[in-house]
Amino acid sequence: MSDTTLSSAEAQQDSDPLFFKILFLVPIIGWLFKDAVHGNSEAKYYFCANFFVGWGLAIAFFGYAAIIIPALCLVALAFTWIIGVCR
């Protein structure tokens, strides 16, 4: 394979949206997310398991704040969805 040809993984990574490219640069979360997007079929399940285990550990360490902060962040998404449906 020559230097001018791109492998399918490199070509696929070049077509990623800007948000994904920025998210891939975050050290630990980016590596897990990149593997979930471009890795094998089981990587998505491992990413979800790691996410929920991490959230559970955050609840164990920080308590109620780790439960309520994601819920408060989703309020904006819910309002956007409601306004979009009602338009």
Image: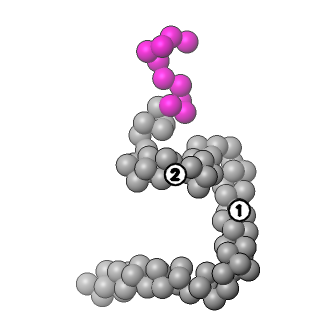
Residue sitting nearer the eye, 30 or 64: 64
Q: The magenta stretch spans which residues?
A: 1-10
Vertical position of residue 2 compared to residue 25: above or below: above
Q: Residue at x 37, y 85 (%)?
A: 79
Residue 30 in the image: x percent, y percent?
A: 55, 51
Q: Position of residue 56 (x, y in %)?
A: 72, 75
User: Is residue 36 in sight in this rendering?
Assistant: no
Q: Magenta segment, principal secondary structure?
A: loop
Quadrant of the snapshot with the N terminus: top right
Mark 2 = which residue? 26
Residue 22: mark in rendering: none
Residue flagged by tag 1: what amino acid is it?
A: Asn
Q: Position of residue 34 (x, y in %)?
A: 57, 47
Distance from disc 2 to disc 1, alpha carbons, whole Å, reads 16 Å
Q: Relative to residue 63, is residue 3 drawn left or right? A: left
Label 1 environment density (alpha carbons within 10 Å; few <14, some 14–19, many ≥20)? some
Secondary structure of residue under mark 1? helix
Q: Amino acid at mark 2?
A: Val
How many numbered marks does the figure carry? 2
Whether 7 is among the magenta residues is yes
Quadrant that contains the C terminus: bottom left
For the point 46% across and 80% down, the residue is: 73
Name the front one of labels 2 and 1.
2
Residue 72 is inside the magenta segment: no
Residue at horizontal 66%, vertical 65%? 51
- In the picture shown, does residue 16 fall above or below 7? below
Is residue 46 among what the camera can see?
yes
Q: Which residue is mark 1?
A: 50
